[in-house]
Image (cartoon, rainbow, N blue to C red):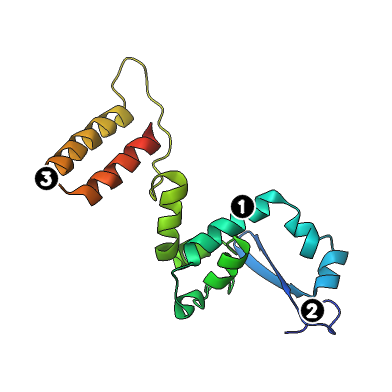
Amino acid sequence: MKCENCGERHAQIHLTQIVDNSVTTVHLCEECASDKGVQTGAAAQANPLNDFIASIGMGVGSNISDEDSAIECSSCQSTLRDFRESGKLGCPACYDTFHGHLKDLLRRLHGSNHHAGKYYFADSEESDQARHTRELKKQLKNAVDAENFELAAELRDQLKVME
């Protein structure tokens, strides 16, 4: 694919911008991207956060087949291979497209792959969160008693996130 800016060199940088649910993707060569202020090559590698995110993406992808890594997001055309290389998803739709592959990564990073959110409650009443925590602890005890350790681990992770 040719650079959309100069039309001469091979496009190596693919920028996706989402504004008001409108997705715009620009394909640029490294030189044109650099001229527009996009960090490329050595400058991008100098950022330790990029290294950390990329290592997370690579850790997840180690057991992904070539067929799976070629799956494309219908919205931004990012692939799982792109995520493995950069550690970044292209758009919000990528979370739905790659959900099965991201589930284990999210569990390792956050202790759970389910977002419980935060709760507000009055001091005098038992909160929904407190009731939910009590119920999860009861389910955890039952799962351990039944030797259902996978469920127990999932419940334990949910309790950690809530606390």
Could you give the CA–CA distance between mark 3 and mark 2, rounded to whole angstroms?
61 Å
Q: Is residue 92 visible?
A: no
Q: Secondary structure at mark 3?
A: loop
Of mark 3 and mark 2, the one earlier in the sequence is 2
Q: Which mark is residue 4?
A: 2
110 versus 137 height, above or below: below
Q: Is residue 154 above or below residue 72?
A: above
Residue 132 at what x, y percent from top left? 27, 34
Q: Nearer the viewer, residue 45 or 38?
A: 45
Asked if labels 1 and 2 touch by Cβ distance under 8 angstroms, the answer is no
Position of the N terminus by quadrant: bottom right
Report the side of 80 relative to 132 (left or right): right
Q: Which residue is mark 3?
A: 146
Quarter occupied by the C terminus: top left
The tag earlier along the polypeptide, 1 or 3, is 1
Callout 3 touching callout 2 (CB < 8 Å): no
What kind of element bears circle 2? loop
Determine the CA span between mark 2 and mark 1.
30 Å
Residue drawn at x 85%, y 85% is 8
Of circles 3 and 2, the one toward us is 3
Q: Report the front residue among 90 and 41.
A: 41
Residue 59 visible in the picture: yes
* Residue on which the image places disc 1: 52
Direction top: furthest residue: 124
Q: Position of residue 115 (x, y in %)?
A: 41, 45
